[in-house]
Structures are given as C-alpha cells and as structure tokens.
Amino acid sequence: MRTAFEGQLQDAATVIETVLAESLDGAHPLMRGTPPRLAEAMRHGALAGGKRLRPFLVLETARLFGVGGAGVANVAAALECVHCYSLVHDDLPAMDDDDLRRGRPTVHKAFDEATAILAGDALLTLSFGLVAGAEDIAPQARLALIDALSREAGAAGMVGGQALDLSAETEVLGEAEISRMQAMKTGALIAFACEAGPVLAGAAEEDRRRLRRYGEIIGLAFQLADDLLDETADAGALGKAAGKDRARGKKTLPALHGHDWTRTKLDDLVTEASACLSHYGERAEILVETARFIANRRS
C-alpha cells in the first residue's frame, strides 16, 4: 500500500513523464529532424518509468519558495534527461555492462552500442535546450541554471565521479576517496536539483546554500542506500543486476564498514538533512520526508 508521500512522488513522476514525452516527440522544436531510430532510442532510455526523484526535488524545492509552472517542470525534465543519459552510458559494456535497467533491456541491448552512445549524447544536449527555452523563467535564472548544470553534470561533477568509479575497480580506496567519488557521481545532480528551487525563485544566497547542503547530504544517503541494496536486494527488486559492485571489486562504504554502520550513518544523515531545513519549518516537511524515504528505500 502506498504512503501519502509515495503518492506525491508518483504524482510528480506522472507530470515529469508527460513533459518528457512531449519534449521527445518528433514535433517538438528540439526534436524535429531527428532520425527515427535515434529518437526511439532516446525515448527508450528516458521514458522507462522510475521514481523521477531528481525532478521531484526540483519541483518541491521550487514550491518551497512559492514557484511553479511550466518553466519549473521544464527544468525538472531537463535534469531527468541528464540523469537518463548518464544511465544509458553507464550501462554500456565499456562501463558497468548491464543488460537490464528498470526491468527492461538497456538501450545498447534494445538497439546497439553506437546508438546508445548517440542517444545519451542527444539526451544531454536536449537538457540544455529545455532550460534555455523555458521562456517563463527569467533569463538571469536560466543562465544560472545552465551554468550550474554544466558544472554538476561535467568533469568536476557526475562525469568525473564516474571516472573515479571506474578506477575504483583497480585501486584501493579509503573512506575519503569513496565519499568524494560518490559526492561527484551521485551527489552532484541531486545537489543541483535542490539548489535549482531557490535559483528559480530568485531567493537569497543563503537559501541556495541551505538547499544545496541539504542536497549534498541526501545525495550521500542515496548512494549509501544504493550500495546497501546492491549487497542485500535481489535483481527482481532492483530492476537490474545485484551484487555487481562486490563482484567487480568496487569499494563501497557498506563493504568497508558493514551493514550496521551503514544503517546508523543513514539515520544520522536524515537528522542532518532535517536540520538544514529547520529554517523553513513545516513548509519543508515534504523535503524532510524525502530524506527519510531515500534513506529507507527498498528498490
């Protein structure tokens, strides 16, 4: 039975799914002229369902400051395009070599490797077009979002984190190195999602710092929970292969410290995330609940 929070998450996912479907339609200005096979692969990679947690965070952090509408939804969908591109590329044989994603064949399995690479490239570039074209957002805010997204998705953020993750298969990493890798690979886009809200609202710099810090904390919690699930869940629950990190020799914090330490750390991170939001009182309760959901997720 779904909780009230899970219902809100699903409602937001439905909104984002609609925006993504419209953005990936051949009639959309950014998609006109796209070769049909490439367009189909893009849709396969982006319209496969999922919790849509990152765009949910964009919507809810914007709502915290009283902002909503089509422009905010476009930014949320743009971030999901970046996330989906990263999954398409992560699944490639040269990376994590996964055959399943959300219970379906990965893009390179459903199509081929070259098409998967191009589909990921196209989703990434589409994301910046969606932000740039959100005309009901002030130009200054759009520029700030494009600047932040290019940084968090790039070599100093998510892409750099993936590079570190690949090297972790052959290098012995300590806790500090693992935490840095995870902050870049997973935390960077989640931090962007949370900072996007105050940017969209034109809020004060202190609000941007608070929400970004909240995002960094729940980003770490997300990766910890993900690593724990990789060790404890089965492929049916995850919708992808399980136990692959340990099999490939990748070092994770649950592998380093054990499951009990990880559960305690997750609880501590929820407390820390909640403290970041104390300034906003009851208005931020859904974001506090999001931190709890991330720390205790089962898939």
Image (cartoon, rainbow, N blue to C red):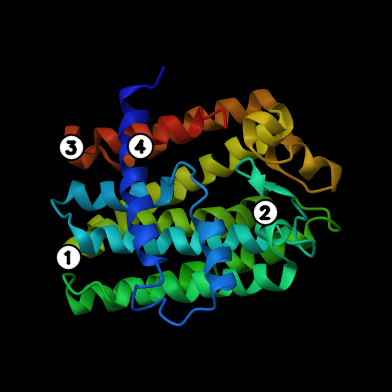
Q: CA distance from mark 4 to mark 2?
A: 24 Å
Tell me which residue sits at (66%, 71%) in the image: 115
Observer-side mark, 4 or 2, equals: 2
The vertical placement of 13 against 72, above or below, is: above
Q: Amino acid at mark 4?
A: Leu
Q: Nearest the camera: 213 or 142?
A: 142
Can residue 283 be seen from the camera position used here?
yes
Amino acid type indicated by mark 3: Arg
Residue on which disc 4 sits = 9
Q: Amino acid at mark 2?
A: Thr
Q: Quadrant of residue 71?
A: bottom left
Q: Position of residue 23 (x, y in %)?
A: 37, 66
Amino acid type of disc 1? Answer: Gly
Residue shown at 43%/31% (left/top)?
Answer: 293
Question: N-terminal of the two: label 2 or label 3?
Answer: 2
Earlier residue among tags 1 and 2: 2
Image-based side of 70 in relation to 292, left or right: left
Asked which secondary structure carries label 4, the reply is: helix
Q: Residues within 10 Å of mark 3 (few under 14, many from 20)?
A: some
- Residues 150 and 272: in front is 150
Q: Which mark is residue 202?
A: 1
Residue 75 placement, left or right of 70: right
Image position of 180 (left or right of 172):
left
- Crowdedness near tag 1: few (<14), some (14–19) or many (≥20) residues, C-alpha within 10 Å: some
Badge 4 or badge 2: first in the primary sequence? 4
